[in-house]
């Protein structure tokens, strides 16, 4: 199977095809003529037809068979048939035993047509394969660009909220400012370096989530009840970076408002290359910010899931009055 995908496959097919065609006259045996034509005629004319095959494939067809010049292509093909016929007759005239008949005249004239027809088919197939390859490369490039754009949208949003936490601690002159700055530096390292990788380990993503939760709890203190239950049996499983934090970020942004006793519940399970992630928070219907600016991060993460885990994830978002929950299952295999 590897041979058929290699760069040597098309040339080998060409070589084998032409070798078979050139070897066909050998089956006639000795110097026996067929329709009054010597065996050498079939060999030489086949070599001539092979040359016209590539001439039509790489010059006439791509240059002339267009909306503007299609009529010139038809004239060129007709001229090739006429010229080839008379060129063959010219060289056959040196053979004193040659006599033009109706039967061998058709062979001399129409012998080129199968080669021209096959050259057109070959060119159509080659163009189709090249188009699919270029389209595949373009899709991959668009995918990479879109993922880069989506990541760039997540990072500034998250960084803005984190810096707001630092301002709050500085105003309070809290002793927790220094450890918070250390956690912030770890988050920045994660965002600037680790997030540039295609995949990171689940343990790294969990560490990122825990740092984020610590910083948020330092900001809100006892005002928000945060419960997290994070367990993993496959810390080395790989996952797209910064894929989970937008859900928690969304919970803090829209779950901490004018409601009484706000809470955020987080559960993560990673086992057998399967990840289950749940975030639940309450919110107040009076918190209009949820309606005005909700969904930017969630839309981004939905797009990333669609691009990175097609048919390998399940995302269920349940938005009920005063309760918002997200349940995400991903196959990391």
Image (spheres, grey):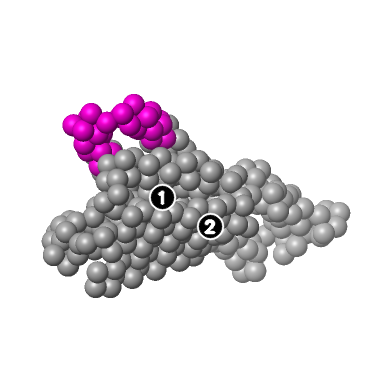
Looking at the image, can residue 192 be seen?
no
* Front residue of 36 and 26: 26
Q: Position of residue 19 (x, y in %)?
A: 73, 50
At 60% from the left and 57% from the top, the residue drawn is 271
Q: Is 276 displayed left or right of 63 in the figure?
A: right
Q: Where is residue 318 in the image (x, y as percent from the top left)?
A: 33, 70
Q: Is 304 displayed left or right of 68 in the figure?
A: right
Magenta stretch, residue numbers: 161-190
Taken as a whole, is the magenta stretch helix, strand or loop? helix
For disc 2, the marked residue is: 269
At 23% from the left and 55% from the top, the residue drawn is 256
Does the stretch in magenta take in 163? yes
Query: Quick one: quadrant of the C terminus?
Result: bottom right
Q: Which badge, 1 or 2, is on the more N-terminal residue?
A: 1
Give the mark toward the camera: 1 or 2: 2
Question: Residue furthest toward the bottom?
Answer: 320
Residue 243: mark in rendering: 1
């Amino acid at each position: 199977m590897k041979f058929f995908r290699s760069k040597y496959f098309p040339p080998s097919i060409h070589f084998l095809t032409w070798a078979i065609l050139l070897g066909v006259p050998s089956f006639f045996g000795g110097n026996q003529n067929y329709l009054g034509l010597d065996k050498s005629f079939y060999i030489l004319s086949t070599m001539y037809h092979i040359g016209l095959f590539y001439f039509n494939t790489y010059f006439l067809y791509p240059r002339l068979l267009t909306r503007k010049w299609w009529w010139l292509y038809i004239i060129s093909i007709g001229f090739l048939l006429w010229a080839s016929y008379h060129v063959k007759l010219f060289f056959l005239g040196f053979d004193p035993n040659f006599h033009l008949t109706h039967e061998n005249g058709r062979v001399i004239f129409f012998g080129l047509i199968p080669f021209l027809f096959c050259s057109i088919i070959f060119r159509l197939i080659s163009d189709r394969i090249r188009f699919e390859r270029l389209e595949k490369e373009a899709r991959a490039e668009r995918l990479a660009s879109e993922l880069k754009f989506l990541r760039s949208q997540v990072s500034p949003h998250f960084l803005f909220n984190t810096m707001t936490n630092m301002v709050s601690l500085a105003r309070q002159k809290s002793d927790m400012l220094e450890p918070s700055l250390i956690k912030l530096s770890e988050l920045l390292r994660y965002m600037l370096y680790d997030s540039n990788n295609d995949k990171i380990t689940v343990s790294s993503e969990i560490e990122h989530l825990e740092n984020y939760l610590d910083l948020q709890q330092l900001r809100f203190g006892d005002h928000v009840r945060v419960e997290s239950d994070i367990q993993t049996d496959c810390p080395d499983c790989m996952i797209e970076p910064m894929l989970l934090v937008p859900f928690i970020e969304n919970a803090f942004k829209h779950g901490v408002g004018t409601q009484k006793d706000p809470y955020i519940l987080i559960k993560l399970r990673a086992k057998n290359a399967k990840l289950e992630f749940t975030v639940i928070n309450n919110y107040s219907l009076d918190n209009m910010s949820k309606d005005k600016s909700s969904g930017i991060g969630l839309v981004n993460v939905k797009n990333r899931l669609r691009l990175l885990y097609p048919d390998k994830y399940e995302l269920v978002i349940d938005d009920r009055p005063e309760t918002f929950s997200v349940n995400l299952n991903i196959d990391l295999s």
